[in-house]
Amino acid sequence: MAELRPTEETGSETARPRYGVLFYIGATGLMLAMFIEAIAVTGRHLGVPLLGALELIQAAILITATASMLSATLADAHATVRLLLARLSPAAREWLVRGAHALSAVFFALLTAAEVWLAAEAWSEFEHSELLHIPYRPLRAIVVVMTAAVAVTFAYKALRGTKRGRSA
């Protein structure tokens, strides 16, 4: 998403999205969820409820959440406690950041493996939501692809290390 740090190219503070496609995918998912909920609330007040609104919102949030996970990983925008890092030598800081990235890569790789396992178990059952019959296969595929991308990104960052001049 937007980053309010001095950029290396210009040295000035800017607020611009670094990974625009993922930002717009996430924003679209949030707007879709908000729109569906507004219609559902209006329908309840008018006596015409929107059946399956929760199922649509859950699908939109899944897309938003996975896009934001990958976007935050690519932009190094995950929450980080810098209190400890600021007191360490550059070598120790580099070691801890690489270790955190390696552990994160393992975590997301295990998450991907678990989702692949669940998808394989349920693939032949043609799972779908109760009211609108939204198929779960494409949603599971999105989760697998995005968590795998996050794992690969963290692994790359663990092997590459931090950029010069950055602490995390």
Image: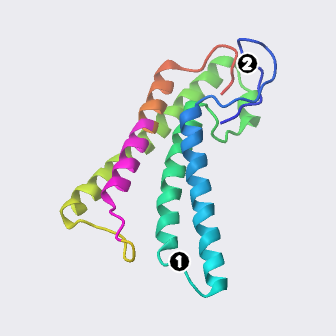
Residue at 57% over, 24% down? 95
Q: Is residue 114 visible?
A: no
As shown in the figure, which amino acid type bears the numbered disc 1? Leu
Residue that carries the numbered disc 2 in the rendered image:
7
**Left or right, 10 with reference to 124:** right
Give the residue at x 57% y 49%.
28
Helix, strand or loop: magenta stretch:
helix
Mark 1 or mark 2, whichever is nearer to me? 1
Give the residues in magenta.
133-149
Q: Position of residue 56 (x, y in %)?
A: 48, 65
Q: Is residue 77 magenta?
A: no
Residue 64 visible somewhere in the drawing: yes
Q: Is residue 48 above or below residue 24?
A: below
| In-front residue for pair 63/53 | 53
Q: Position of residue 35 (x, y in %)?
A: 61, 62
Within-10-Å neighbours for mark 1: few <14, some 14–19, many 20+: some
**133 versus 99 height, above or below:** below
Tell me the residue that label 1 is attached to.
50
Q: Please tell me whether residue 39 is drawn above or below residue 81 in the rendered image.
A: below
Q: Residue furthest right?
A: 12
Q: Dot 2, crowdedness within 10 Å: few (<14), some or many (≥20)? A: few
Asked whether 61 or 149 is in front, the reply is: 61
Q: Residue 62: x percent and y percent?
A: 48, 55
Mark nearer the N terminus (1 vs 2) = 2
Q: Secondary structure at mark 2?
A: loop
Question: Relative to 145, is 103 on the left or the right?
Answer: right
Q: Amino acid at mark 2?
A: Thr
Q: Work out which quarter of the rendered image holds the N terminus and state it.
A: top right
